[in-house]
Image (cartoon, rainbow, N blue to C red):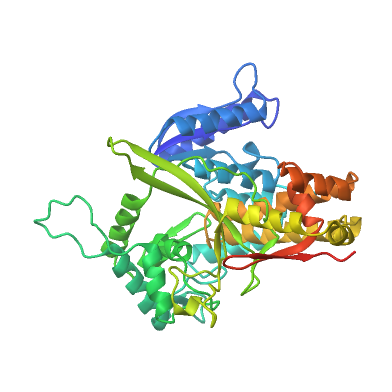
Amino acid sequence: MRAAGYYRPQTTDARSEQAAVSAIERYCLEGFHTLSRVVGPGEPPLRDADQYGALVSYLEGLGRGEALIVIPDPRHLASTLDGLVSRLTELDSAGGEVRCADPDRPDPLQHALESLPFAGRPAAQNRRVRESLLSKAARGEVLGRTPYGYVADIDGTFKVEEIEARLVRRLFDLYAGDAPSEESEQPAPLGGPGLRRIAGILNAEGSHTRTGRPWSPVTLSGMLRNRVYTGSYLRYGMRIAGNHERIVARDVFNRAQEVMASRSPDRKRRSLTPYLLSGLARCWSCGRGMHGIERQRQWSRADGSGASRSYRYYVCPSRSAGVTEADVDADGEVLHPSWREAELDRAALGALRDESAEVLRSSFVPVADDEANNEIQAAEQQFLESVRSVASGRGGVSDLITPLEELRTTRSMSQASSTGFTFEDAMDSIQTAEPNGLHAAVASLVERIVVHDGRVEPVYRTS
């Protein structure tokens, strides 16, 4: 795999810079990666933002495909945990997969949880805990929650849970499709149904995840990528083939990876523009917060040229793939709605503009200092839990975009309230729909926006 190195000087000693480059080169050599470029500070040294911008520009210039970004440790990419996550998500959307040169801690999130501060608190440095985890990893034992299809045996190893394993095998068989025959000229398997269709099939049959939620394409995608189902163990830099009983044959797993790669669109740099109703919009049926997602549509013009466009949506996370009878209530209303971003934003702002000034003024509540601190602490804790979840193998870097966005939004709201944000300021923002301060304006008037399939209901604050 092609790779690029990236480092920032940690001291004024030239030997520190040489050590960083050597660590990057050694990692690529041992992993058989082609090191095409090392992005350093330059001479004279670039500012951190400019050097990072050069790395992003390099990735975008590669065009189709992905690249490995090798850093000595997370401190070279960011000075805080949330700063690191911000850059990891941006690099991920540009096609870059970040790895640390430290052979014991190659995962940047696992490394950062021990080495980077967050929210003014120093990094955790519990060596005994880490040594215990490494010891378990060396023995191929379960760390954290077991993947769907396995349970922890009495000795801490992976044991197949046959009922769940049957669903796992079916997922791989459906998605991978039949193996091409020897006479076939097809270079890669066509595969079976897509993830959205498979999720719909499983949900229609009454199947659900361990937490009782409907299957989603994101969950199924993570399962299809997990090598644990082939009997392989990969944690904390430990790779153990044949560690436990496999659920999926290796040829079926490999065929599923080929199908997934053939269906993956070119990765573009994702817009990280915050969603206006992040943390405010909630599903009328289940009460869960609506997630902001972005989808890419591609089509061919009449002249044969290609075109693409991004669409942003708010989607209830409980929404299953495809609307079935189970997704509609007795009156025919969709239980877990999905809206285009612009339409839901417009509906919410329209509802506020139509409300009387008296109601809005009586609902206006600038966030008090104690309340702001509580909200920030809750957002920070939720963000930290999300990072730990992804670091433990449950999800990918892209799953941290929403928690990071909600953390930023909460901090922004607190800052706006602490600088004398008034009712007049809120009304002016809502009338003009200027992005700066608009989220804080809406949040100062409503506790939440209840989202139905075709309408919204603001739930106003009480002063």
Quick check: 240 above or below 4? below
Q: On the image, which quarter does residue 356 sit in? A: bottom right
Q: Name the one closer to the observer, 271 or 384.
A: 271
- In the rendered image, the quadrant that contains the N terminus is top left
- The x, y position of residue 10, in whole percent, is 68, 32
Q: Left or right of 324: which side holds 291?
A: right
Residue at the left extreme of this rendering: 183
Q: Which residue is located at x 19 percent, y 50 percent?
A: 187
Q: Is residue 258 visible?
A: yes
Q: Residue at x 36, y 78 (%)?
A: 166
Q: Position of residue 171 (x, y in %)?
A: 35, 70
Q: Image quarter for residue 324?
A: bottom left
**Figure check: 365 above or below 334:** above
Q: What's the residue at 35%, 62% (across, down)? A: 194
240 sits to left or right of 121: left
The residue lying toward the viewer, choosing from 460 and 316, is 460
Image mark count: 0
Q: Residue furthest top?
A: 44
- Give the x, y percent position of residue 128: 68, 61
Residue 7 location, x and y as percent? Answer: 59, 32
Query: Does residue 443 lie above or below 249 as drawn?
Result: above
259 relative position to 69: left or right: left
Q: Quadrant of the C terminus?
A: bottom right
Residue 113 visible, this angle = no
Q: Residue at the location (57% across, 67% down)?
A: 453
